[in-house]
């Protein structure tokens, strides 16, 4: 009898010990803190901040952090457009998103943080210089806060900062936020109508600005076309129209290809 009781107590002790152990192992709040696994904290995404007014920082930003060649072209400018400026005969200009919007809407000035990157090419199409204008709030209030920089194609700094020669040259267009490339004042783009009447363009000569649109409407019963080389319309029946927005300066002669000796005109575009 005593032996039976002892065996029963021994088994009961083993059962209780095992149960406590299982319960302790199942409880995540019990145990040595040093033995618990610590999960790594995932880093948060951080947007690239705008650089300071420093030539090296700006070049790193536009080439490594935020490739300027993925930006929009300057509104109404082709990828490589002719120029008579000191920067070279052929230019390509890219603009940051906030700058592009302000230019297109003729906001009058570009907002702080705006950037424009100009690539200058020679007549053979070889890149010879990269220029940057960057508006930094409070940087140079006398000259609309523009930071200027020019680089070799390899990224070596030619000039940067408050470049006096840039300020003097662009002061001619200070009212246009020191911008030569196009008007950004609040003067709206115009739409000019030209009628085709009695086998003539009326008026046959029009003076406009870059960004203006000309619309030709055929008032004759005969079919006419508009052909200026750079711009061409389909055959226009009576009452039909054709429009073209002029994005660069120049003198454009055009004609009706159906009546080339009767119906001619010209458009003179200034910047």
Image (cartoon, grey):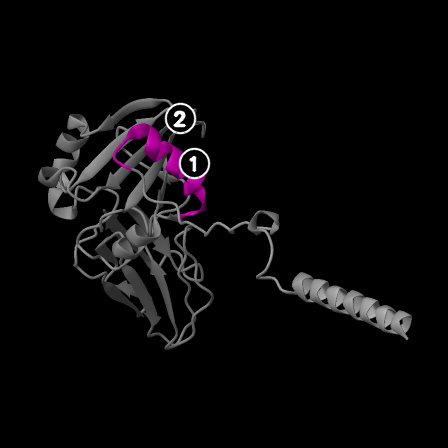
**Vertical arrangement, residue 271 with respect to residue 203, above or below:** above
Residue 251 percent coordinates (x, y): 29, 46
Residue 158 percent coordinates (x, y): 30, 22
Q: Residue at (66%, 63%) from the top-left corner?
A: 24
Residue 87 seen in this snapshot: no
Considering the image in quadrants, where does the N terminus appear? bottom right
Q: Which mark is residue 155?
A: 2
Residue 210 seen in this snapshot: yes
Name the foreground residue: 223 vs 192: 192
Determine the image quadrant of residue 62.
top left
Residue 241 falls within the magenta-colored stretch: no
Residue 259 percent coordinates (x, y): 41, 61
Residue 65 falls within the magenta-colored stretch: yes
Q: Is residue 10 left or right of residue 187?
A: right
Q: Which residue is mark 1?
A: 63
Residue extent of the magenta highlight:
52-71
Q: Secondary structure at mark 2?
A: loop
Name the foreground residue: 162 vs 220: 162
Q: Residues within 10 Å of mark 2 (few under 14, many from 20)?
A: some
N-term-proximal mark, 1 vs 2: 1
How would you classify the magenta stretch by its main secondary structure?
helix
Name the foreground residue: 2 vs 84: 2
**Vertical arrangement, residue 108 with respect to residue 118, above or below:** below
Q: Residue at (25%, 34%) from the top-left corner?
A: 53
């Amino acid at each position: 009898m005593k032996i039976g009781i002892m065996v029963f107590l021994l088994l009961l002790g083993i059962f209780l010990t095992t149960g406590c152990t299982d319960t302790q192992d199942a409880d995540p709040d019990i145990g040595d803190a040093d033995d618990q696994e610590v999960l790594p904290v995932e880093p948060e995404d951080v947007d690239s901040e705008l650089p300071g007014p420093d030539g090296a920082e700006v070049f790193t930003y536009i080439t490594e952090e935020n490739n300027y060649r993925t930006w929009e072209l300057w509104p109404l400018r082709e990828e490589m457009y002719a120029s008579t400026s000191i920067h070279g005969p052929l230019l390509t200009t890219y603009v940051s998103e906030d700058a592009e919007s302000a230019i297109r809407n003729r906001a009058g000035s570009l907002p702080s943080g705006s950037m424009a990157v100009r690539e200058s090419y020679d007549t053979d199409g070889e890149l010879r210089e990269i220029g940057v204008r960057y508006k930094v709030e409070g940087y140079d209030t006398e000259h609309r806060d523009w930071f200027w920089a020019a680089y070799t194609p390899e990224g070596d700094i030619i000039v940067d900062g408050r470049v006096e020669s840039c300020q003097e040259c662009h002061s001619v267009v200070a009212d246009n936020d020191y911008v030569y490339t196009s008007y950004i004042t609040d003067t709206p783009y115009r739409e000019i109508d030209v009628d085709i009447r009695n086998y003539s363009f009326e008026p046959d000569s029009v003076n406009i600005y870059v960004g203006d649109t000309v619309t030709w409407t055929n008032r004759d019963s005969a079919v006419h076309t508009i052909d200026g080389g750079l711009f061409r319309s389909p055959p226009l029946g009576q009452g039909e129209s054709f429009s073209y927005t002029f994005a660069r300066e120049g003198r454009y002669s055009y004609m009706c290809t159906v009546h080339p000796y009767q119906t001619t005109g010209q458009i003179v575009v200034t910047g």
